[in-house]
Image (cartoon, rainbow, N blue to C red):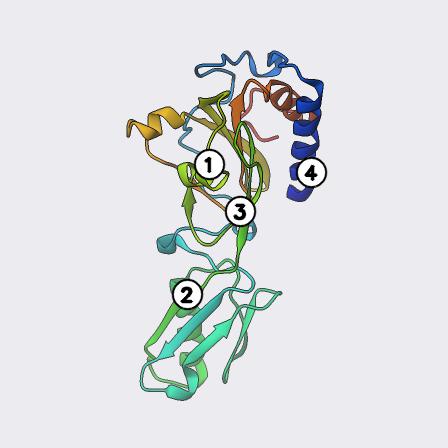
């Protein structure tokens, strides 16, 4: 299922739950108390890492280039080879002398090494190359459930779960901040993890990174049917297994 289709399903199910005006018990998730943790989605699983390259805007230290990112390449003492470049829609940059260089999915260091290799092969002896990201393309996340302004939210670069909820204007009065689910694509498979926003606020747990195309859903009294419909529409078995 494409991310856009999944987002559309989330929005439709949420509107249906609000219209129905009742909170269904979350049988598919093994129960979910209004004031605490619950369900079968594991909290803070160790293997809930960064999503697939094509769906991510990652922290600068691990940043992988995406289409429309802007970078600066500096070749020491060779001004004609230094300048600003933009990753095109196909994920490449057009570099002097070399021509087309694949950039999408590479970190700045990996791209630097590739440009160095290509220049060394035919044109320069041990060139000193540096690559830095000057502007990241805009990514989006979806924040839904018991938040004041649910919807698709633009981000640039890295953000965190706390910030993602803040971008949706915070939680509503009926929210259960002890249960927040994050959906993500890892190794080509949809996965999910649960987090306790209360523990994060008390500095008892780390504020996890949120990446482009992540879907964040905050539990609340009006989201019980949403949770049930999400699970029934994605056939999940025990959650945090590929689905």
Dot 2 and dot 3 residues touching (CB under 8 Å): no
Q: Nearer the viewer, mark 4 or mark 1?
A: 1
Q: Which residue is mark 2?
A: 133
Query: Crowding at label 4, few (<14), some or many (≥20) Cα neighbours within 10 Å?
Result: few
Give the number of the mark in front: 1 or 2. Answer: 1
Q: Which mark is residue 52?
A: 3
Which element type, helix, strand or loop, lies under badge 4? helix
140 w.r.t. 126: above or below: above
Of marks 4 and 3, the one in the foreground: 4
Q: Seen in the image, is 216 located left or right of residue 81? A: right
Residue that mark 4 sits on: 8
Estimate the x, y position of residue 14 in percent, counting from the top left.
Answer: 65, 28
Depth order, front residue of 175/142: 175
| Residue 166 picture quarter | top left
Left or right: residue 176 compared with residue 199: right
Query: Do the residues bearing badges 3 and 1 touch, measured as CB atoms within 8 Å?
Result: no
**Where's residue 153, x and y in %?**
54, 45
**188 on left or right of 116:** right
- Disc 4 and disc 1: Cα gap in Å? 19 Å
Task: Give residue 235's quadrant in the image.
Answer: top right
Residue occupying the point 42% across, 41% down: 163
């Amino acid at each position: 299922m494409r991310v856009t289709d999944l987002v559309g399903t989330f929005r439709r199910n949420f509107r249906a739950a609000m219209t129905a005006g009742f909170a269904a018990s979350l049988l598919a998730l093994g129960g979910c108390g209004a004031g605490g943790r619950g369900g079968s989605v594991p909290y803070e699983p160790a293997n809930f890492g960064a999503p697939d390259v094509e769906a991510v805007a990652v922290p600068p230290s691990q940043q992988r280039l995406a289409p429309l990112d802007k970078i600066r390449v500096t070749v020491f003492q060779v001004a004609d080879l230094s300048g600003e470049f933009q990753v095109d829609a196909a994920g490449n940059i057009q570099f002097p002398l070399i021509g087309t260089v694949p950039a999408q999915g590479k970190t700045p260091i990996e791209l630097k090494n590739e440009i160095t290799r290509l220049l060394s092969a035919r044109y320069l002896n041990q060139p000193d190359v540096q690559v830095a990201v000057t502007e990241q393309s805009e990514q989006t996340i979806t924040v839904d459930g018991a938040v004041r302004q649910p919807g698709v939210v633009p981000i640039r670069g890295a953000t965190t779960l706390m910030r993602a909820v803040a971008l949706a204007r915070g939680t509503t009065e009926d929210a259960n901040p002890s249960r927040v689910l994050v959906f993500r694509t890892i190794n080509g498979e949809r996965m999910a993890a649960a987090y306790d926003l209360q523990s994060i606020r008390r500095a008892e747990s780390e504020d996890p990174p949120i990446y482009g195309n992540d879907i964040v859903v905050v539990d609340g009294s009006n989201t019980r049917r949403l949770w049930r419909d999400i699970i029934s529409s994605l056939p999940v078995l025990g959650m945090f297994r590929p689905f």
